[in-house]
Image (cartoon, grey):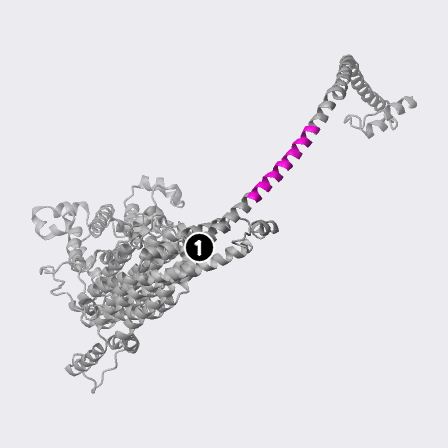
Amino acid sequence: MNGTVDCLVYEKNPADPTCNHSSQNSILEANSVADIESSLASLRQRESRNQGHLDEYVALQKAWTRDLARLDLLRGGLGSLAVSTRVINSDVLTEASETAVRISSSVKRLDVEQFRVKSTLDVVEQVAELKACVLGVTGSMGAPQDWETAAGYLSRASKIPKEITTGSFTEGIVPTAEVPDPPKVTLENAAEALCDLFLREFEKAAAEGNGGKVTRFFKLFPLIGKPEVGLDVYGRYVCQGVASRARANLNSHINSGLQKEGMFYANALTKLFEHIAQIVESHGGLVERHYGSGRMVKVIERLQLEADVQGGIVLDTWSDEHHIDRTLTDIRSYAFTFLVQSFLQAPPPRATIPRPDSPAKKGIIAEDHFKSDEMIDMKEVNSLMSEMAMMLSRWSLYTKFIANKCNVGLLPGINRITDFWQQPENSVQNLNLPSLLSKSALQRKVTDRLVGPFNVMSAFFFRRSVEKAFQMDEQPLDLTLNLTKSIPSHPPYITSAVDDVMYIVNQVMEKTLATSQLSVITNIVPTIARILGSDFIGMIQRRMRDDCYPKAAAQGDLPPKQTTIAFLVLLNNLDVAVDYNRRIVESRSDMTLEAAEQHGNAGTPSVSLHISFPLDHDALTVSETLKSLKSSFDAKAFELIGDGIYVVFKNIMKPRLRLVLAEAFRHIDYQMTQEELDQARTPAEAETREDQVSEGVVQENFRQSWEVLTKPIARLLTERNFAKLISLVVSYLAEVLEKRIWSYYGRLDNLGAVRLERDVAGIASVAVRGGRYGLREAFTRCTQICIVMNMEDDEWEAVKDTLSNTQDSDIDWQLDQDTRFRARAVVKNRV
């Protein structure tokens, strides 16, 4: 028994999950008959499973036998195929392979022989060609003096490889009795002789002004292998024409009216650039055709050197004649006395100080300003700025034209200097300024003589214009807060300084952008923003603070009407200036900011800016600079407008607003019962209590007082400023109205609550009348308090449980839970 069990235990499959180690030893460790029977049952189960596996293996044995038989048959067939393959390989393929090897070797030997023969023929042909060229050069340079033919032979000889020209075989075959020198020496001597000859003939034709002969000999230099010499002599030739034309332009019309207008030197510089552009345009094709692509750049470099000289002479003469250095010195020493004194703290009153309106004081200040104005002629400065802007614009146009010619094919279709103003949209790309322009002497001269002075003069001209605008500032006439009196002028009501300053802003911006110079724009535009922020807005702020601050003379009084009007006009100045500045910026970028945002390209410069500033990423920089002017001015102006609107609200509107509300609720009793109301409607008491019980009396009283309060201000302020003011007023009105509602706590019955809700709604409708429906949100708390007050008991019970969680309610509650329960208790006898 034990042996059988041990054998079964050792035959156990380790992967069998039903027979583990414990089951194997269980029969040996059995202590009872039940344990033995359990172990035997497990062994029988395992025996049955193993028997099933053996049956499956036996059943598969027949299929395996059939497969093995098939393999034996296939092996026999493969044996016969292998014998046939060995026969084909030994009898057929071996012979064919040997034949192919013999044919391949023969073909290779034939190819080598053909290559050698061809190479020999090529050498022979090249030697023959070289010999023909040597004889042709010497023959053409002899009695016939056919220079074109001689140059053609040299051009043909230059195409022969150098190893052929200098080879020993060539040196032994080519020389003849007539030409005994080696071919290399002969060709070099002929090239040098022809080069000297062509130079003499070219210079002679240039001196005679014979354009045909100049072109004839200019085309021959690349044929004799001297393109650099040809380009150099041609550069000198065209530069002589540029120099003579420039001197003639500068010396002509000395006393002409054009010079008196201040545009003589600008036109002289323009003619210089146009002459150079015409040369590049008309001769570029000839140079590119005979000298190769890109070789015109060499001539452009030589022309630019001449442009440096002639342009420098024009700029120096212009600067000396107009005394630019002295003007700049005077500008830098100008003290801006009016602006400085306007921003100084007012001195304390003394007996020895003249009155503010004293004629003596005004005479001193006027005399100082008159002396300052005499020192610098603003018309002369403006004329100089216009001429500098014109010269800078012509320089910018010239640089773009030359940059396009040096970057061949970058801007297709731009062949003339004037084409830059009519570029198609799809040809706008970025240009790179070549070093021959960026490092040129004329570029440095333009920076020193034009860019620097233009920046200084523009800043001075604009700031002096701002100062003069405030010196000559005039208030709008016949403004009044009395609604019974009409105002003869039309809104917006602003002082003359706004129109004057913004006109100058537009003029300076126009001149600045016309220069097409990035350095000028990035200097002037921020300067304009700085002066607008510090002087223009600062002067208005100083006047709002010191001259016309709306402050009551005594407690409980209102500010003087003229002071109030002046303060409102200054607020209008800021608001209108913002609109002017925005239109100026948008007109320069050819796209409104709203339209740009709608098209999703608010940060993308317009096509016109790309046309004016095609170099690198200049257009994007200009666009961002213009937008920074608008954003910086808007930020400062709106900040001051906000402060001023709050002053108007606090000192003018707020003190009267409580009286307006008190007047609306005067003689209104919300504790009257229904019987008292019915009795009040009887004819006996109608005369004494009609105003109190008539429908909408509170709304009508409020409307009358509200119009008296707001219409005079609305008539003078701009629409945007009044919208900001009325927003503050309505917010405060809602707060005061809410306090009045709470004042009826515990003193209202159901009827009084209904009447109060109706009157609150009437006041709100009057306040938001005129399309200002967005202000109705300010009365949300008042409206919700009235809603809670007038809820029916069953309605209140239905929603009371949801009040702790506003998300479960249909109403967007702005009242917290405690406030809503308090509102419910406003009506007496409610908990």
The quadrant in which residue 576 appears is bottom left
Relative horizontal placement of residue 759, taking residue 91 as reference (left or right): left
In the figure, 94 relative to 302: above or below? Answer: above
Relative horizontal placement of residue 111, taking residue 8 as reference (left or right): left
* Main secondary structure of the magenta stretch: helix
Region in magenta? 102-124
**Residue 26, x across and y down, in percent:** 84, 27
- Give the total of numbered labels: 1
Looking at the image, which is closer to me, 153 or 311?
A: 153
At label 1, counting other C-alpha atoms closer than 10 Å, the crowd grade (few under 14, some 14-19, many 20 or more) is some
Q: Is residue 391 visible?
A: yes
Looking at the image, which is closer to me, 498 or 552?
A: 498
Q: Quadrant of the N terminus?
A: top right
Relative horizontal placement of residue 710, taking residue 779 as reference (left or right): left
Whether residue 108 is in magenta: the answer is yes
In the figure, 535 relative to 691: above or below? Answer: below
In the figure, 24 relative to 435: above or below? Answer: above
**Residue 352, x across and y down, in percent:** 20, 87
**Residue in the image at 61% along x and 51% along y:** 168
Q: Kindly identify the amino acid type of the residue bearing the numbered disc 1.
A: Met
Label 1: which residue? 141
The quadrant in which residue 708 appears is bottom left
**Residue in the image at 26% along x and 53% along y:** 741
